[in-house]
Amino acid sequence: MARVTLQNIEKSYGDVHVVKRLNLDVADGELVVLVGASGCGKSTTLRMVAGLETITSGELQFDGKVVNDLSPRQRDIAMVFQSYALYPHMTVFENLAFGLRLRQMPQVEIDKRVGEAAALLGLNELLARKPAALSGGQRQRVAMGRAVVREPSAFLFDEPLSNLDAKLRVQMRLEIAKLHQRLGATMLYVTHDQVEAMTLADRIAVMHEGVLQQCASPNEIYATPSNTYVATFIGSPAMNLWRVPTAQQTSAEVAVLGVRPQDLLPCGQADATVQLRVEVVEPLGADTFAYGEAVDEHGRSLSDKAALADTDVHTRVRAESASVVRLDPHTAVRPGELLPLTADPARMHKFDRTGNRVN
Amino acid sequence: MSATKKGFPPWALHFLLVPITVATLYPALYVIKLALSGTGGASASPWPWPETFSLDAFSAVVGHKGSDGSWLFGRQLANSLIVSLSTTALGITLACTAAYGFARFEFPGRRAGMLGFLATQMFPGILTMIPLYVLMQKLNLLDSMLGLILVYATTTVPFCTWTLKGYFDTLPKEIEESAIIDGATRLQIFWRIILPLSAPAIAVTALFSFMTAWNEFVLAYTFLSREAAYTLPVQIRGYVGDKDVQWALFAAASLVVSAPVMALFYSLEKQLVGGLTAGGVKG
């Protein structure tokens, strides 16, 4: 398996800069998830690593060797596509064996590798079938099998679970996690689904508008987001972003206060950090979410547009949505109530006007 | 069905469909009637079923011999087959490769090339006859099958290229990218992925190409002067004389000429149905 290094990678289509000075190091055997909203440049980055897109500038290295000008075949990588991209006229066996045949591998070796991959992914009964006779989950397993048989230096996954239904997605996510554990392979995985990112990744790389925002372990990204984009992108429901209440104002540098919905606890009026003017209550069984407008001790809105006018765009966008708090399902709360809430200062996130974290 | 659901009565539908069916079938039935009426003159009766049943006209057409006693029909059948199959093979080979290039690669003149192909289809074929005749004469290709094959192939290539490009455009690029990742070259992708997946489109295009060459009369009649070099449509014209028309032979020859096209159509039926790409990518 290979170590994959992206150094100052850029991709432009004419005047449109899709990926900007991207630096990322994927260690040997590591699973890094590139995550971000549609159009953030994550798939383009993956395709540049695969060799399906040219690199405008920067260096791509496999184990320290520059591979910018190498063909996908020479890079020895395998890729699993969102749309499966199986060969419809070939059986599952032939789909798995195609890459090996192109390398003129002996038939005995092909049979052995296909057999092992089929056993690993539970495809033994399906080897004689064509893709049209398979379910979505089976097709995606074949697509993964096609990558596994090659024993490549790195695996690339381009939103492999996006076309599956919710139940199957969970199942396949576990299979990919198991596959990574068994193979110990270097994997670069693209998704827009933060749950996939959090559950699969050794490290998550969050991208936005072609720029890498933060790359860290799932826990670190969640606990210490580097800016308001990461703070609101990772975690569901998204982190609340407010102007700093007067009582909490400790530094002129801090312009935005972030608190995750589960870090807010109902309390007595005297201990309240903020109050939520409840508008909607959503009981979900295990949790109850209360949505509404957060106000300070004087009843002034913490999402006030004027107060947040000079903050970054992500703060302003988040402030336009309702504030939210996660409550114990037994908490009695009704729309129209003013719910006093407190938060552990250690769990509050502070950002400056540009949206960057202030430690 | 929807018409019936909306209250359009079935008898009204049949009232429309029956005369359309009769009008469609009548000429074909009348040709069969003529062909089965023996080698005598044409019947004056308008009814499309034969008054007598005779295969004499078929025997006369198939057994047609030249002045030197050679089996002329066999020779002309072979001419037609060689010309049509060669035209199809050459046309499809050129059209497949050209269409793949137009569908998948960006290069200067790509759009102009496709529009140029389209433009050639807008002029009546007769317009090219004189220059083609001069060209063939200079190349010493008159009265030769090779000349006819080249002319037919070049006239069918633009249409075939457009048809195939349209189909190649519908094939998901991810399948090719997947093959690139698997280590396939462009040529391997073309042979092992694109062509098998395009079997339905290639079958349709091949059928069109074969039919065009098999049925073509005007160019063959212009370029061929020796009876032994004739293709079958030119020979059929021979049954229409200056003073009389041998309708039974004309009809029987028409049916004999139609038979291979029909056989080809049925043999390609499975490919024509298509649907080969089902399941390759998420639909």
Image (spheres, coloured by chain):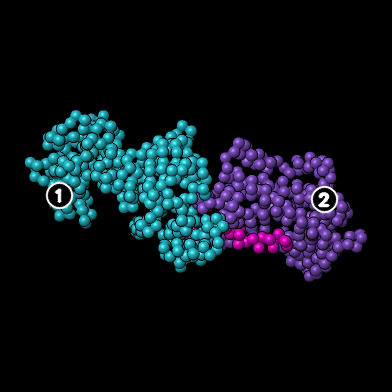
Chain colours: A cyan, B purple
The kind of secondary structure element at disc 2 is: loop
The majority secondary structure of the magenta stretch comes to helix
Using a 10 Å C-alpha cutoff, classify the residue at mark 2 as few (fewer than 14 neighbours), some (14 to 19) or many (20 or more). Answer: some
Disc marking residue B234: none
Which residues lie in the magenta part?
B259-281
Amino acid beneath label 2: Ser
Residue B137 visible at all: yes
Q: On the image, numbered disc 2 is attached to which residue?
A: B144
Amino acid beneath label 1: Val
| Chain ID, mark 1 | A
Between A175 and B213, the residue placed more toward the observer is A175
Which residue is rendered at x = 83% and y = 41% of the image? B138
Between A220 and A299, the residue placed more toward the observer is A220
Q: Residue furthest bottom?
A: B53
Q: For this view, does B22 lie left or right of residue A335?
A: right
| Chain ID, mark 2 | B
Residues marked 2 and 1, same chain: no
Disc marking residue A333: 1
Residue A295 image position (x, y, % from top left): 16, 38
Which residue is rendered at x = 70% and y = 53% of the image? B89
